[in-house]
Image: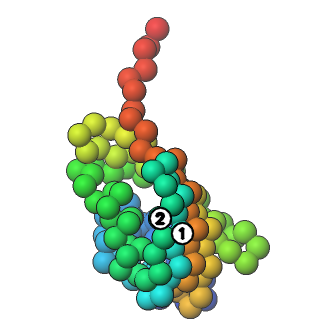
Amino acid sequence: MANSSPDDPLATGRGFVSALQRQAWGELAAFLDPAVQFRALTPRGFRNADDRAAAANYIQKWFGDADELILQSSQVSLMHDRVHIAYRIREHEDQWYLVEQQAYCTIREGRIEKLDLLCSGFRPEVAQDPS
């Protein structure tokens, strides 16, 4: 839950990833400051939001239609005064996709105040030839 460890920014980052993995959109939104500065670069262009609802809506729009979402890997670490959050997700909608996102966040009192994100795009998974 958001704000459970306001003095531990890494716990906030891990909680954000956990909520995303479980598609717990209300919980994910609670990790965002009400006036979060959200900036994302995706293959389809630049996205930005200056409030919790709009930022959470982008993330839910990207992952919310998945009928299966598998967190393949994640990393949450300090990068000087920011928190680096990275994850690779395999998700199924009409087919399987892989997506990676990297984010750098400013976290204060258990909430993400600024989130700068880079997205790989949703890459269709292609079956590998076993030969």
Residue that lies at the very extreme toward the right in this rendered image: 80
In front here: 9 or 50? Answer: 50
Query: Looking at the image, can residue 9 be seen?
Result: no
Q: Residue placed at 42% from the left, 74% from the top?
A: 55
The disc, 1 or 2, on the residue closer to the chain's N-terminal end is 1
How much space separates mark 1 and mark 2, taking CA atoms? 6 Å
| Tag 1 secondary structure | strand
Residue that lies at the very extreme toward the top in this rendered image: 131
* 114 lies above or below 93: below
- Amino acid beneath label 2: Arg
- Return the mark for residue 47: 2
For residue 123, what is the image quadrant?
top left
Q: Residue placed at 43% from the left, 20% from the top?
A: 128
| Tag 2 secondary structure | strand
Residue that lies at the very extreme toward the front in this rendered image: 45
For residue 2, what is the image quadrant?
bottom left
Disc 2 crowd, CA 10 A, few/some/many (<14, 14-19, 20+) = few
User: Residue 38: image x %, image y %?
Assistant: 51, 73
* 26 lies above or below 84: below
User: Residue 110: image x %, image y %?
Assistant: 53, 86
- Return the mark for residue 11: none
Q: Mark 1–mark 2 contact, CB under 8 Å?
A: yes
Disc 1 crowd, CA 10 A, few/some/many (<14, 14-19, 20+) = some
Q: Residue placed at 35% from the left, 80% from the top?
A: 53
- Amino acid beneath label 1: Arg
User: Residue 28: image x %, image y %?
Assistant: 38, 74
Query: Looking at the image, can residue 90 be seen?
Result: yes
Q: Where the N terminus falls, by quadrant?
A: bottom left
As drawn, is 130 to the left or to the right of 84?
Answer: left
User: Residue 58: image x %, image y %?
Assistant: 38, 66
For residue 75, what is the image quadrant?
bottom right
Q: Please give the residue where the numbered disc 1 appears in the rendered image.
A: 39
